[in-house]
């Protein structure tokens, strides 16, 4: 798979992992695990990129006597998920064209 395409898809997966509520790194990895293996170093690189692009905000909160970083999706992040859904419909349409069998061009 094209590395840029894969990177864009994984970014949207991370956004989707927190769209229903703020989350933290370990929980994001755990929530994504049934669908995608992601290392901590890869996740934190993605989270930083999404923060810098305005799709996430970050805050810290105490949990169990320690500070934990939480990630919150922004309106721009939610918009990116919707854009991705529309883009993916187009990709799927192209995929169906490429993989169609038995159809003849006349």
Image (cartoon, helix red, strand yellow):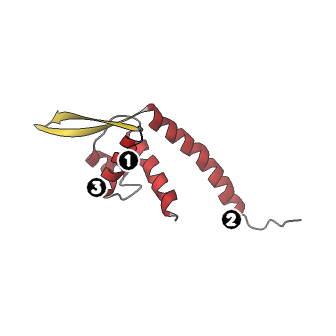
Q: Are marks 3 and 2 in contact (CB under 8 Å)?
A: no
Look at 33% across and 35% down and name the residue there: 22
* Left or right, residue 67 beside residue 32: left
Q: Which residue is mark 2?
A: 99
Q: Which residue is mark 3?
A: 40
Q: Helix, strand or loop at disc 1?
A: helix
Q: Which residue is mark 1?
A: 49
Quadrant hosting residue 58: top left
- Work out whether residue 26 can be spotted: yes
In the rendered view, tell whether residue 1 sits above or below residue 73.
below
Look at 36% across and 59% down and name the residue there: 37
Look at 43% across and 43% down and name the residue there: 16
Q: How far apart are labels 3 and 2 at the CA level?
A: 36 Å
* Left or right, residue 91 beside residue 70: right
Q: Which mark is residue 65?
A: none
* Left or right, residue 91 beside residue 57: right
Look at 85% across and 66% down and name the residue there: 105
Q: Which of 76/91 is in front? A: 76
Q: Position of residue 90 (x, y in %)?
A: 65, 50
Q: Position of residue 65 (x, y in %)?
A: 10, 37
């Amino acid at each position: 798979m094209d590395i840029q395409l894969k990177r864009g898809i994984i970014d949207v997966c991370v956004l989707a992992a927190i769209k229903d509520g703020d989350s933290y790194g370990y929980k994001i990895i755990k929530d994504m695990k049934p669908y995608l293996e992601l290392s901590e170093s890869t996740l934190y690189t993605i989270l930083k990129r999404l923060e810098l692009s305005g799709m996430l905000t970050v805050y810290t909160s105490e949990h169990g006597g320690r500070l934990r970083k939480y990630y919150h999706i922004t309106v721009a992040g939610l918009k990116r998920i919707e854009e991705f859904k529309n883009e993916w419909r187009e990709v799927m349409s192209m995929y169906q064209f490429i993989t169609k069998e038995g159809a003849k061009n006349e």
